Amino acid sequence: MKSIFETRKPENQDLSPFIAYYYFHQSTKDSGGERFTYYPHVKNALTVYKNSKIEITDSFTTSASPSSPRYSYNYTNLISHFAQAEMNSPFDKLGIVFQPLGLNHFVENDLSSLITQTFNLNLSLFSLHIKKTLDQVYSTESFTEKTALLDHYFQQIFTGFTDKKMKQAMGLILAKNADYTVQSLANELEISRKTLLRMFNRHLNCSVKDYLRVIKFRKAVDHFQSSHKNSRLTDLAYDMDYNDQSEFIHHFKKLTGFSPKPFFKNLEPLSNQGTYWSKKK
């Protein structure tokens, strides 16, 4: 085995509204590695590396290199632009990909007090008590057993999330044909714009505007991929309620660094769970 990328959904259906899937990414090569670009998403991941050290090399890049026995952690908050990851072989990486608001159901405090940066390498809310589970996960080669162990861990630490307005807001903006502005969302929720902004900062540690922009981008990506790339980009812009082609192109360039055509050309699905990266040779 040289390299694998495997995804598994939680077996426990009670966790599905909060955890989208787990992924297992491993390379046993003695040298070299993998480099890829990833893009803004509302499903954000806690990643764990076994025997690798993670470093932030610049504002857009994280790098993982082999190190002495240890677990290294990173949680990437909502990003409003593309980012890059470099993984030097050998590496053994685990990802827990949370649904929108999913992480909030496993922490006791507001997310804004726990997630303070784009890349969070000192995630003590998990690292203090997850090690025993990680030892068990990494000791088995069965993905079914790995999934069951992770399910059990997250069942044990489940805290719930009680902000009804935040849940309502998420339900509205995730709806298939929804296209809100900050003000129209506040109006729909019957709260002030100021309250809405404070709510997003508190529970998602981001602005409403950035979140809505990423939602719209992801809906466009998923729509295009699910059409088996048969959609014309002009039709995609229309279907996603962009005002015109110019707004569509500007939106993609801002988030990905590319206009839509080269972006979709270089996009590579890594799984059937909506994981799309652009690998660098």
Image (spheres, rainbow, N blue to C red):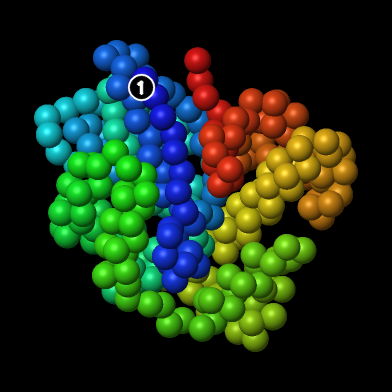
Amino acid bearing label 1: Met
Foreground of the two, 196 or 53: 53
User: Going 60% across and 30% down the picture, which residue do you hit?
Assistant: 268
Residue 220 lies, in percent from the top left, at: 72, 47
State how many labels appear.
1
User: Going 64% across and 25% down the picture, which residue do you hit?
Assistant: 266
Q: In the image, 140: left or right of 82?
A: left
Residue 127 vertical placement versus 272 (above, below): below
Can residue 195 be spotted in the picture? yes
Foreground of the two, 3 or 224: 3
Residue 175 vertical placement versus 79 (above, below): below
User: Going 62% across and 72% down the picture, which residue do you hit?
Assistant: 171
Residue 23 lies, in percent from the top left, at: 41, 44
**Mark 1 secondary-structure assignment:** loop
Q: Which residue is mark 1?
A: 1
User: Going 45% across and 49% down the picture, which residue do you hit?
Assistant: 8
